[in-house]
Amino acid sequence: MNAIALLADEGHLEMTKQILYTSFVFGNWNGAYILLAHNINDAEKLKWFSNRGIHIVHTKSLVDVPGATGIYYSKLRLFHPDCSHWERILYLDTDIIVQWDLNELTQVRGFAAANDCVKFNLLHQFSPRDRNISIDEYHERKEIFKDYDLSKTAFNAGMMVIDSENNTQKRYEELLYLAQRYYQWSTYGDQGILNLYFQNNRIKLPYVYNDFYQSDDFNRNGFIRRTSANDAIILHLTYPYKPWNLNCEFYEKWKTYTEKADELFSAKQVGKPLPAWRKWRTELINAFNIWRVIKR
């Protein structure tokens, strides 16, 4: 069996409900659901999920990371061997809305993820946010990560297909080792660590499976423009507004789906596969506009 996995602390439990709803109704998902409950010990707070048969996996910071970023590394729990009874796990961040059928992803054989926005390379995962690193910092990173190719295109870990049937204790411990060793340089938490581990054996998913329509100005205002997010199978709303922010253009849609979440598993599944020509049209538009951005 396959599963969809979500991660939340107490403050984000409500945000996960619309993902459950949209993945079931529009994603036609009939596999299992997993909630990684980060530092949530009150069973009453999890009752909505447990009553609906959602698998609750209790997590805490798996890596000794200071501050609030420890939650990000809880994703690594999905690589533990006790998750290997699921053939594959589709991980989705809380700022995602599912719009089309997801079942094509159940045919993926191996670990898979879509490129990070604008095809950022791996060096970007270990650089300070919002500024370019200096020449000295660049050479420092090159030395620290000399066993890795920092010029390779990085992937975004907010949406992943995990080949969990291949989970072993060795894989899990190697990921924890990398996290403990490199977390202080990993700008986006677990994402940099996962990129190090899977940089040579990642299957690249099409852009529509992790679509940054809201934040990708180069697509919305590019030479060939996208005029809507209708072709996003998985719409990822990272910046400038999360979907639960009133300023987000998708807020009303998010709010409606959240309110309907109590109908989970009783609602009719109405999702359709995104036509292939629309998938590849969006892929080509994205690739062309990225090429223009990089060329400049």
Image (cartoon, helix red, strand yellow):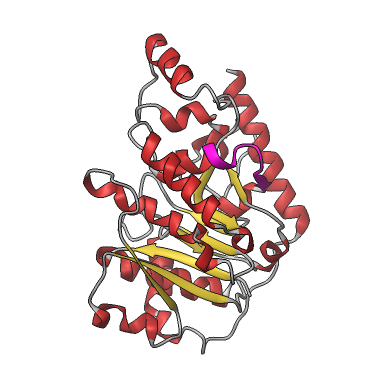
In front of the other: 123 or 12: 123
Please indicate whether residue 118 sits to the left or right of residue 15 in the image: right
Q: Position of residue 231 (x, y in %)?
A: 63, 56
Res. 119 image quadrant: top right
Q: Position of residue 75 (x, y in %)?
A: 43, 56
Residue 267, compared with residue 283, is above or below; it is below
Quadrant location of the N terminus? Answer: bottom right
Q: Position of residue 232 (x, y in %)?
A: 59, 56
Q: Is residue 268 magenta?
A: no
Res. 292 image quadrant: top right
In front of the other: 169 or 36: 169
Give the magenta-colored segment's residue range: 196-205
Residue pictured at 51% horizontal, 86% vertical: 265
Residue 187, compared with residue 6, is above or below; it is above
Total numbered badges shown on the rendered structure:
0
Whether residue 132 is visible here, answered yes or no, is yes
Please indicate whether residue 279 sits to the left or right of residue 76 in the image: right
Residue pictured at 45% horizontal, 77% vertical: 55
Name of the residue lying farthest toward the right: 277
Q: Is residue 200 magenta?
A: yes
Q: Position of residue 36 (x, y in %)?
A: 39, 66
Residue pictured at 57% horizontal, 17% vertical: 296
Residue 32, compared with residue 283, is above or below; it is below
